[in-house]
Image (cartoon, rainbow, N blue to C red):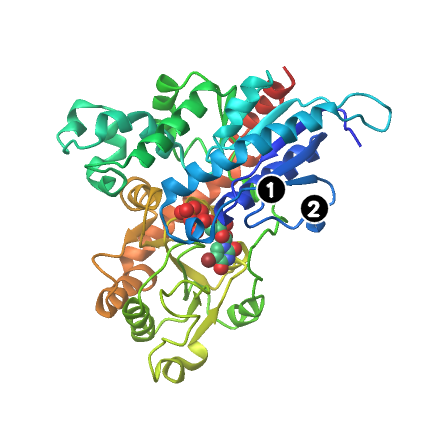
Amino acid sequence: KQQKSGHLVLVMFPFQGHITPMLQLATILHSKGYTITIVHPELNSPTPSNHPEFTFISIPDKLTESEVLDGDAANLMLSLNKNCAIPLQQCMKKILHQKDSHDHIIHITAIIYDTLMFCSQTIADDLRLPGINVRTSSAATLLLYALFPHLDGKDSTLENEIPELQSLQLQHIRALLSQNPTDAMLEVRNAFTEGVRSSSAVIVNTMDFLEQAALSKIKEHFPAPIFTIGPLHKLAPTICSSLLIEDAKCISWLNKQAPKSVIYVSFGSLASIGEQELIETAWGLANSKQPFLWVIRPGLVRGSEWIESLPNGFQEGVGERGFIVKWAPQKEVLAHAAVGGFWSHCGWNSTIESICEGVPILCKPFFGDQNLNSNYICNVWKVGLQLQNKLERGNIEAAIKRLIVDIEGEEIRKKAMDFKKKASLCLQEGGSSCCSFNELTRHISS
Ligand code: BUP
């Protein structure tokens, strides 16, 4: 049934860290009276029966198994956008020719698309519809995209030449840069920045107080209004869109642990480690003597189905002190009083979920924007510390003690708790995200 505010078509990028925030955004917009249609590629399709309030339309993505699994993110994004462009356009045209139960033509008020589904902006332009770009990563990452053309192949002296970089600290984002970016990388970057430049608005899942400096710089590079409406997971807390089943037994285990004693370990939905790194992590956790909750996702350990490569004697040695799950109810875990620290890969969702609960972070970034997020966590916001060097049991044991037991960890926790308060203020009436959300709905209706 068409609701009074308008009809929004949301286009999803099919990976965990993108599906969840998009569904959260859909839920919030629906609660404001919008009719929601979600268009998604076939890969990792969400479960429509969990959301009877939305219409779901699946489009063929023609991705091959090797494209999905070979790990080249830029090529995957290009294929996905190339393969989905025509089906997406046909789908939009079909929606525009439909009639509702009162025989009225269905209008589309705006196409709201994940920044990585950049083909959507061209389709919105062709159909003369507003295209709204959704960023599920930080504002700093967006700023970086504006700066990439000045950065590739350059050295750190540029930090002094380009003032924007002072807040980004070039030496910490080196992993995001490339001396020889591939053609695919350059094409993807251009498509991202073009998408943001031509969109009618940009939604960023962040909070003003976290990224004030980057946000004001972004405005100099991109003309579209930016709406900072995070943290989305707090605005739509009931959304569960996990591709794997959450293991709720870990909450009963957490209930038995002392306050702020547990280190929660999760490397997100995509990162992988080698067998030796798994062994070092296992002994580092065991030797720390702290209780730990560890997500070992199927696929986390390269060449291993699940936990068969855990070292002999490890599970017997840690006994009840350690709990391993395939997938955790992460937001509930981070909000639990027993959790004292989060050893994280620093994906953006995990970063803000931790900040919102005041949980200090032990950072071990793997790729992409995780390096930039880790730099912000440790050096700018000071709500975490970096796991130095490689995954080695001695480093791990020492870092966990620094975070959970030492006075240094106490200071970081105070800062993290302060951020928790600030994050909750953003969502209250008159708070920055609340105001930004109201402005967004005015923008959509204008
Ligand atoms: Br693992 C795990 N339970 O056990 P990020 C993750 N999550 O709910 P990404 C669980 O997945 P990139 C688990 O709460 C977060 O919302 C977690 O998103 C949830 O990292 C999401 O943190 C993971 O953005 O990589 O998607 O792994 O850095 O590419 O975003």
Q: Is residue 116 above or below residue 125?
A: below
Q: What residue is shown at x 31% (from left), y 65% (from top)?
A: 274
Q: Callout 2: 10 Å neighbours few (<14), some, many (20+)?
A: some
Whether residue 335 is visible to the viewer of this picture, yes or no, is no
Observer-nearest of 279 and 118? 118
Q: What residue is shown at x 34% (from left), y 29% (from top)?
A: 145
Residue type (three-letter) at the residue carrying disc 1? Leu
**Residue 92: where, in percent of width, then height?**
64, 27
Label 1 near label 2: C-beta < 8 Å? yes
Dot 2 corresponds to which residue?
51
Is the CB of mark 1 within 8 Å of ligand 1?
Answer: no
Position of the C terminus by quadrant: top right
Inter-mark Cα distance, 2 to 1:
9 Å
Residue type (three-letter) at the residue carrying disc 2? His
- Under circle 1, the secondary element is helix
Dot 1 corresponds to which residue?
23
